[in-house]
Every structure is written in C-alpha cells, then in structure tokens.
Image: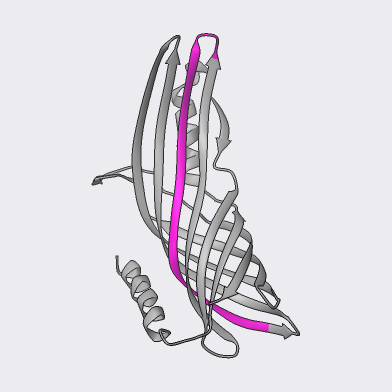
Amino acid sequence: MKIYNCIFILIIFFFVSNIYSQDYIASASIGYGLYNMSSLKGFQKDILNNYQNINLKTVDSFPPFFNYQMQITNKISSRINLGIFFEFLTTGGRNTVSDYSGEFTIDQVVNGYNAGILIEGKILEKQMKNLYFVCQLSAIYSTLLYKQYLKLGDQTNLRSDNFSSLGIGLEPGVAYEIISSFVNIRLKLGFNTNLSQNFHLDGNSSAKMNIYPDWTGLRFGISVGYAI
C-alpha cells in the first residue's frame, strides 16, 4: 500500500504548495484507449470451454473504448507544469447464445477509476502553439461486474457478483497545444503501463480470483482547458 499512500501525499502536496498560485488550468478531455486485458480475455476463453455443449459465442472481448479525464495543472516555471488528474475508463466482454427456446448471456463489465499526479515539460514553443512531454503516475481502482442471465421460455434468472482490484499506472506521452484567447486545446498521445492486483470479491478481500485488470495500451485524446 506504500505506493498508494505516496500518490495521495503528492496530491495533497500539490494543493498545499500551490494554494496561493494564480496560474491554474482546469481541463476536461475525452480519449480513446486500447486495453490489454489478457487475463480477462483468457478467463473469457475458459468460460467458452466450460459451455461448449451449448455453443456459447464471444461477441465482445474487451475492445478499445472511450475514456474521460479531468485535470488541474499549475505552472511552476516557464517550462514545467505540475498537476493532478482523475480519469474514468471502461470496457467489457460478452459471451452469449440464443435460439427459439431462450437465451444465456455472460457479461463482464470492467471499470477503472484513476487518480494521480502529472508533470509536463515544454519541448517546443512557437507563437501560440506548444509541444509538451507529459508523464502521469496514478493509483487505479478497478471493478468487475460479472453477470449471468438465463431465459427459458417465460422464466428468467439473473446472477451478478462484484469484484475489485487496486493497481498503479504510468503513462508517458506527448501533447500538442493550441492557445486561443479563451481556451487551450490539446491533442494527446500516450502509452499506459499498468500493474494491478488480482480481483477479489467485494467485502471479502480473501476471496480472490486468478484474474486481474490490465489497462496497458495506447491512449489518444483531445482536451479543452481554461484558466481559473
């Protein structure tokens, strides 16, 4: 747990050390991410093998999807910005089969809640355009919702279980910034590496699964920032 405590302390330090600063930029971004999820994909294949007799098929296998981020940065020198960010990520998998007699579906919905610190270094500056190197360090809380839905005729049955996991992430990248009189617009490209614990049943940390989330992959995004 030491790494999570360090990240929390750094977030507090950011607020305390910059409490009287007037150079804050608040930004909101939408992005698109590729997610490794090799462990969960393997688990999904195991599910298929367990239900071969009913011809269960995979229709979604943790595809790339949109993510959303809020961040606050502060200019601490002419070329360095320091900030904090909060991010939401999501993806999922689905196995299903249906015919005239009914339907059987297994869903795995994975969400990630990311919070941490970031540092930006200005690489190039030309008129109202800047190029930054950006590095984000974060703690990530991941959740897994596992659902089984069965329908036979008029009878239905739904079972669901919730699991969670803690992890850390590191995301280096670059950001191209266009400055206007009202807002700053950025195009971002990065690569996230992630290390997370195995999922455990909510409310029972000893009931662990042999699978874990892996948000590792490319990130693309666009953000709009405003001075506050």
Kindly identify the residue that appears in the image at 38 percent across and 25 percent down: 158
Magenta portion: prevailing SS class = strand
| Residue under the point 51% across and 61% down | 193
Which stretch appears magenta? 99-123
> Residue 146: where, in percent of width, then height?
40, 35
Residue 74 visible in rendering: yes
Residue beneath the point at 34% across and 36% down: 161
Looking at the image, can residue 197 be seen?
Answer: no
Vertical relation: 106 (above or below) 19? above
Count of numbered circles in the view = 0
Res 128 quadrant in image = bottom right
Relative to 133, 44 lies left or right: left
Residue 21 on image: x %, y %? 47, 86
Viewer-side residue, 39 vs 26: 26
Q: Position of residue 159 (x, y in %)?
A: 35, 27
Closer to the camera in the image, 25 or 161: 25
Image quadrant for the N terminus? bottom left
Depth order, front residue of 175/61: 175
For image coordinates 50% across by 73% down, the residue present is 72
